[in-house]
Amino acid sequence: MNPVAAFPNVYFLGIGGIGMSALARWFQANGHRVSGYDKTVTPLTEALAAEGIRVHYDDAVESIPAEVRENRAQTLVVLTPAIPKDHREWAWLREQGYDIRKRSQVLGLLTAGHYTIAVAGTHGKTTTSSMVAHLLHHADVPCAAFLGGISVNLGSNLLLPPTTNNQQPTTSNLPVVVEADEYDRSFLTLHPDIAIVTSTDADHLDIYGNKEALVESFRQFVAQIKPGGTLILNHTADQSITESVAEGVQVIRYGLSPEQGPELYADQITAQGHRFRFDLHGPLGDVRNLELAVPGYHNVENMLAACVVAQLQHVGEEQLKSAVAAYRGVKRRFEFIVTKGEKVYVDDYAHHPREIDAFLRSLRALYPGKRLRVVFQPHLFTRTRDFAPGFAESLSLADEVVMLDIYPARELPLAGVTSELILSQITAPQKSLQTKEQVLAAAESDDTFDVLATVGAGDIDQLVPRLRNILDIRWNGVEA
């Protein structure tokens, strides 16, 4: 029996989170009464409301729907770590004895009876998991997917399998693609058949303390791959985690070049505009003349891992080539917002120094010699404290860096930790600390940049539609 079937009501604390909203959509599609709280109105919460999910924005017990307040035994509460410890609704639900589960625990319950493809890594997991889901879906492989971003192809962060007589299939061989989040060791609720590990760079040191503790959590994660399963490991990740895989688990290493010795690699890589062409060489067969329409060498690497998963699911060469060519990316991952000749505005979710480095180097490769302005919003005080020199080094690839204040998310301020900590170490020719309104005013009046990039994982995305409108008018003469 499905372990969540006993709960007709599902209430989300933090329903607007990208992972939480995918779960909310799944429960809604499967006949549960879904509602939830979030701190602010966003396009995602508005989309949930339009789909029939009740969302409120005040932390007040009386705002919790009556069927939740009056039916404790029939209600599952799903909690995101972003909810602060002094949250009134959470305190009341605890006091009343509700069954409260973390998002990761619920995801573990939902995937327990299915063939699970889990994508882990300190960066790259959203794009890679969306690639896996797209390749399988495009090749007509019945599957489900819970994604950490909005797939452009799917128009959602949730992929539901085909239905038969309005019933979702429950067979254990149905592939389910999930992001395996290392934050708070959440991915240890999963027992995958296939696991991809894209990276094991230091991150979330507020949880782990040091990189070795983070790597140890990845060892524990890969130890949970089911017997006979497969680990697909980026060659730049910590290779010691392979020592923890169970006997009989196949390990496939991947990378962009055969020089590092991976079993799966790309060559004949060429960039033509925003498109990359490459050949795939791997243990399950070679595929030549693949064409990827989203830019970035890191995305070629991500696609390698996704392709071998599709091959493991018996997707043929021609199906694979068609699916790769049709992939259109994830919202806020190297997303082109406005283009006019060689003037361009791009938005990206990068929030780790290595992600920013890969993104900006790809932009430089696409637009050599063009003046690059980057607007960056740091995400979390602890991440800013731990990686300020790395952020400064990667951002210094730009001609001009505009810093916004730190987006705190779940954290309280730390003494001495501000955006100035990064700004003071940036060596770009021009740098400044600005408000969002100043960024918009500069876009209206200053035309000294050729390429504009907004970068970060906080609420910097609120700038995107306003900047789109400004630049559409300035560059294209049309109002968005």
Image (cartoon, rainbow, N blue to C red):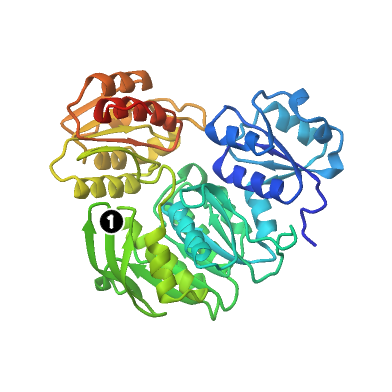
Residue 252 is at least partly visible in this image: yes
Quick one: SS at disc 1?
A: strand
Q: Does 51 appear above or below 184?
A: above
Disc 1 marks a residue whose amino acid type is Arg
Q: Which of 358 and 23 is in front in this view?
A: 23
Q: Position of residue 274 (x, y in %)?
A: 27, 52
Residue 305 is at least partly visible in this image: no
Residue at 72% of width from left, 23% of height from top? Answer: 60
Residue at 58% of width from left, 51% of height from top? Answer: 158
Residue at 51% of width from left, 70% of height from top? Answer: 244
Q: Nearer the viewer, residue 103 or 177?
A: 177
Q: How crowded is mark 1: few (under 14 residues within 10 Å), some or many (20 or more)?
A: some
Query: Would residue 285 appear left or right of 217 to someone viewing this image?
Result: left
Q: Does 278 appear above or below 435?
A: below
Q: Name the residue under label 1.
A: 275
**Residue 99 lies in what quarter of the image?**
top right
Residue at 38% of width from left, 35% of height from top? Answer: 384
